[in-house]
Structure formats: structure tokens, C-alpha cells
Image (cartoon, rainbow, N blue to C red):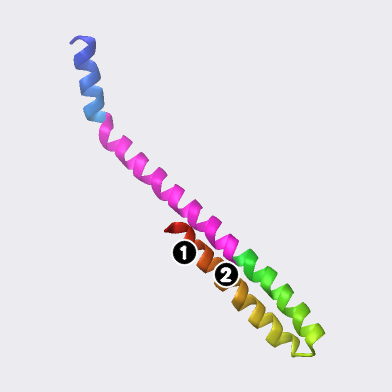
Amino acid sequence: MDERQADAVAQVLLAPGQKAQDEARAARERAAALRVRQRRVAWLGLAGAGAGAAVAWHGEVSLGLGVICGVAVGALTGVLNRRLASN
């Protein structure tokens, strides 16, 4: 068996394993990208909570309502940002 035939046999034997590794790597990359996007939305929600609390404090509105509205606005901003960036 010459070198060319040995390489062909090795490729046939290793190809299924390589394909599975490539699929697993792609799945890990997709999951990591999703976590990054989710963290961005969470941070924007947290920033919105702080901003909503500050506005509620100075606007003499219920602090809980201000935080909830701030989180909603911040998370909505993050989701819209994510959707617009994917297009």
C-alpha cells in the first residue's frame, strides 16, 4: 500500500468522526453566541431598572413600578437591537 492509498483509507475511517466534531463545534459556537446576546439583553434590562428607579424616585412614582417599567424598556431595547442586528 502506497502513501496515497493509506491517506485515502485514513480519510474514510476518520471522516465520520471529523464530521461529528465539526457539528459539535458549530453547536458550541451557536450556544456561545446566544449566551452573549442573552447577556446583552440582561445588562440592558439591569441598566433600565436603574434608570427606571431613578426616574421613579425623582418623579414621585412608585419605585417598584419604575423598576419594572425600566426593566421592560431595557429588555425591549436589547431584543430589538438583537433582531435588527441579525437582519
- Say if mark 2 contacts mark 1, CB within 8 Å: no
**Above/below status of 71 relative to 24:** below
Magenta segment: 14-41
Amino acid type of the residue tagged 2 in the rendering: Thr
**Above/below status of 6 relative to 39:** above
Q: Quadrant of the C terminus?
A: bottom left
**Above/below status of 30 relative to 46:** above
| Image position, residue 74 (x, y; %) | 62, 72
At horizontal 38% and vertical 45% (from top left) the residue drawn is: 24
- Describe the element under mark 1 as helix, strand or loop: helix
Q: Which residue is mark 2?
A: 77
Q: Main secondary structure of the magenta part?
A: helix
Amino acid type of the residue tagged 1 in the rendering: Arg
Give how far apart the Cα atoms at labels 2 and 1 are.
Answer: 10 Å
- Describe the element under mark 2 as helix, strand or loop: helix
Q: Which residue is mark 1?
A: 83
Q: Residue furthest bottom?
A: 61
- Callout 1 environment at 10 Å: few (<14), some (14 to 19), or many (20+)? few
Q: Nearer the viewer, residue 30 or 24?
A: 30
| Image position, residue 4 (x, y; %) | 21, 14
Answer whether residue 64 is magenta in the image: no
Name the quadrant containing residue 61. bottom right
Name the quadrant containing residue 19. top left
| Image position, residue 66 (x, y; %) | 70, 83
| Image position, residue 44 (x, y; %) | 63, 66
Q: Residue furthest top?
A: 2
Answer whether residue 16 is magenta in the image: yes
